[in-house]
Amino acid sequence: MKTFAITATLLILAACALAQAPVAPLQTSKADVYVGFVSTFPDYGEDFNSYRFNGVEAAYTKGLFSHVALTATGNFVGGSTYSVKQFSGTVGPKLNILTGKVRPYIMAQAGYAIQNSNGMYAADHHPPAPLGKSLTESGFTFRYGAGIDFQLSRRIYWRAIQVDTQVMPWGRHTPWYTNMGTGLGYRF
């Protein structure tokens, strides 16, 4: 009988604790804006961190359905090595895996990218371009990745991390860039 009383008490306490838990919203927000810092790592050089470009990323997200949104993203990065200046603009779906205070998500986007550099991919051209000559390359790009947002207040969230892979349209070996970012957003 003592075991039954202890078990019943524990079950009642657990039920009370669960009853007090806040209910997470079941849908994504109507819209939000995001601005953050981004580092881009091309798959060029001897290792992952051979080259790194730093910059800013901004995004506008419009909620479509429960857990599904459409995001338009623009990022500008640059690096002193080869005087790289790069912009990409992409659009695509975002799927929030959970909603509430913690929001992991996955996304896929397609768009356009342009890069100006002093010969970053000069050797990848046929014939090779002269090193130090300013080259501008552009074309179709796509990216896919995942991230996690933490709701700090009713309107403000922190994107703890977003990691995505982006295929760039220049050079013979079609470089794959890894983007890592963090920043703050505002939900409408």
Image (cartoon, grey):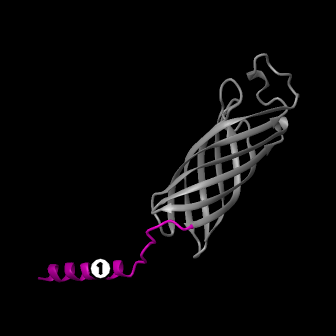
Above-or-below relation of 54 to 127: below
Q: Which residues are magenta?
A: 1-30
Q: Quadrant of the C terminus?
A: bottom right
Label 1 environment density (alpha carbons within 10 Å; few <14, some 14–19, many ≥20):
few
In this view, the residue in front, 87 or 62, is: 62
Residue at image mark 1: 15
Residue lying at 84% horizontally and 41% vertically, measured from the top left: 80
Q: Is residue 21 left or right of residue 68?
A: left
Residue lying at 65% horizontally and 43% vertically, measured from the top left: 111
Q: How far from the left and from the top, in percent, is residue 40?
A: 69, 44
- Type of amino acid under label 1: Ala
Residue lying at 72% horizontally and 35% vertically, measured from the top left: 50
Q: Is residue 159 left or right of residue 16?
A: right
Quadrant for residue 30, please give it. bottom right
Label 1: which secondary element = helix
Q: How far from the left and from the top, in percent, is residue 19?
A: 34, 80
In this view, the residue in front, 18 or 94, is: 94
**Residue 15 lies in the magenta stretch:** yes
Q: How far from the left and from the top, in percent, is residue 83?
A: 85, 38
Total tally of numbered discs in the picture: 1
